[in-house]
Image (cartoon, helix red, strand yellow):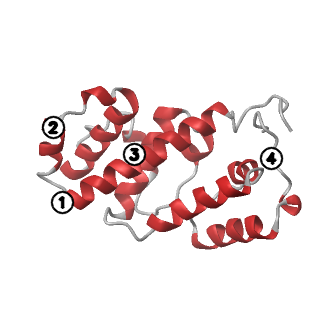
Amino acid sequence: MMPVIAPLPMEALDEECRARIRAGQATGMYSQTLPLQVMARAPAALRAMDEGYKAMFRRALLDDRLRELLRVRSALLNGCGPCSQSRKEDSVNEADVMCLADPEAATYTRRERLALKYLTQFCTDHYAITPATYIELAEEFSAAEIVELGWTCAQTSSGHRFMHTLDMLGDGEPVIG
C-alpha cells in the first residue's frame, strides 16, 4: 500500500507527532497510522486533525455508536479506504456496517436513520438539506446535538474526501515524497 504522498517513517516524525499518534493509538482513537504518517509531513495539520478528533472522541453529545456509524458511512460514501476498514466502537458490528449500504434499514433506530440520512445528503447533495430537514432532526435531537451532528458530518466527509484523493490504499508508487 502506498498513497500518492509518501508517508514518513515513524522514526522520522518529530517527537510531538509521534507522541500524538501513540496517545491516539492507546485510546483507540487511531487504529491505523498510515494517514497520520502522511499528515505528519505538515505537523500543524496533524496537530489540528488530532485536536479535532480528541475534542469529540468519547466526549461528544452524540453517542459513540452513532458517531461510529456516521464515520464509517462517510468513509464509504467518500472513498476513504482506511476508515472504511477500521472500527473504533465495539457496539457497531459487521452486520451494522453491511446495513450502511441502506441507511433506512430497520436494524437502526429512528435517530440513527435520521442521522445517516442527514450525512448522506450532506455528502451527496447538501442543497437537499432544508429547514424541513432540521425540523425532522429536532424530533430526535436537541439543538446542540444537531450542531454536533452537522460538525461531525463536515469533519468526517472532508477528511475522508482528502484521504481518498491521496489514494491511501493504492498500489502505485508515491508521486510526491
Pinpoint residue 64: horizontal percent, then vertical percent: 39, 63
Q: Residue at x 50, y 40 (%)?
A: 158
Secondary structure at badge 2 equals helix
Mark pair 3, 4: CA separation: 26 Å
Provide the residue designation for mark 4.
7
Q: Which image quarter: residue 123? A: top left
Mark 1 vs mark 2: give the one in front.
Answer: 2
The crowding category of the residue bearing disc 2, from other C-alpha atoms within 10 Å (few below 14, some 14 to 19, many at least 20), is few
Mark nearer the N terminus (3 vs 1): 1
Residues marked 3 and 4 touching at CB (< 8 Å): no
Q: Quadrant of the N terminus?
A: top right
Provide the residue designation for mark 2.
131
Q: Amino acid at mark 4?
A: Pro
Mark pair 4, 1: CA separation: 41 Å
Provide the residue designation for mark 1.
142
Mark pair 2, 4: CA separation: 42 Å
Mark 2 vs mark 4: give the one in front.
Answer: 2
Pinpoint residue 160: horizontal percent, then vertical percent: 54, 40
Mark nearer the N terminus (3 vs 2): 2
Provide the residue designation for mark 3.
153
Q: Amino acid at mark 3?
A: Cys
Q: Quadrant of the C terminus?
A: top right
Residues marked 2 and 4 touching at CB (< 8 Å): no
Query: In this rendering, would 17 be left or right of 27?
Result: right
Pinpoint residue 112: horizontal percent, then vertical percent: 27, 50
